[in-house]
Amino acid sequence: MTPPAPASHIVLLGLMGTGKTAVATKLAPRLGLPFTDNDAAIGAATELNARQIRDRHGTRVLHNLEARHLLDALDAAERTVVCAAGSVVEDERCLRALVRPGLFRVWLRARADTLAERFHNQDHRPLFGKDPLALFTHQIANRSERFLLLADAIVDVDGLTVPQVVDRVTAAIGSRGARRSRTIELEIEPALDVEREP
């Protein structure tokens, strides 16, 4: 049996705080690939971090920038590890791009309490209300189904170190079978008014 061709891009999906950047920083060299990170790309283009963009220009502008990063990254000819913002699963353009054949999508999944605990140590993250636990509980409820439909592999990061997560992602990539193109059908509801999220 002919082994499957290497994925054109390895895409790390998940909510903010799941460790996508930290994982990609170690995963990409192990795979011999460059990586492109949402926060770094937006920072380079705007000289602002996510919190500053959201505070100055609003959530819609931030999410549009996050979507544009993913679309540009997936259009690149060079194979890469891509860190996608959590918001991209609410953008129809991104969903269409994420189901292209040849990608390998890994959902870094975490509990709300894990994300809330990490959130306090990350000043660049945008603030949506005063209760991070309520925010992440809400986001998990609204986004998990789409992450699940997209994911070729799921790695639960709760209680794991970054090297342990990298090992599990690497194992998932190494054990993937031949991929077939597939289509997901999701009803895209109007974007959540995250300005009003708890």
Image (tube, rainbow, N blue to C red):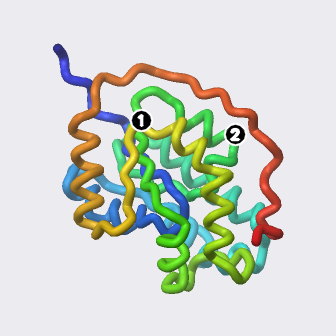
Q: Residue 130, relative to residue 143: is it above or below?
A: below
State the image coordinates of residue 23 (x, y, percent, origin top left): 33, 62
At label 1, which amino acid type do we have?
Leu
Q: Residue 189, relative to residue 40: is it above or below?
A: above
Numbered label attached to residue 119: none
Q: Which residue is mark 2?
A: 92
Q: CA distance from mark 1 to mark 2?
A: 17 Å
**Quarter of the image containing the C terminus?**
bottom right
Residue at position x 61%, y 66% in the image: 136
At label 2, which amino acid type do we have?
Glu
Q: Residue 146, relative to residue 161: is it above or below?
A: above
Say what secondary structure mark 1 lies in. Answer: strand
Q: Which residue is mark 1?
A: 103
Residue at position x 79%, y 42% in the image: 189
The image quarter containing residue 161 is: bottom left
Q: Earlier in the sequence, mark 1 or mark 2?
A: 2
Q: Residue 1, relative to residue 72: is it above or below?
A: above
Residue at position x 56%, y 58% in the image: 85
Residue at position x 71%, y 83% in the image: 130
State the image coordinates of residue 177 (x, y, percent, origin top left): 28, 26
Viewer-closest of 27 and 64: 27
The answer to whether residue 146 is visible is yes
**Quarter of the image containing the N terminus?**
top left
Badge 1: residue crowd in 10 Å (few <14, some 14–19, many ≥20): many
State the image coordinates of residue 46 (x, y, percent, origin top left): 62, 72
Badge 2: residue crowd in 10 Å (few <14, some 14–19, many ≥20): some
Say what secondary structure mark 2 lies in. Answer: helix
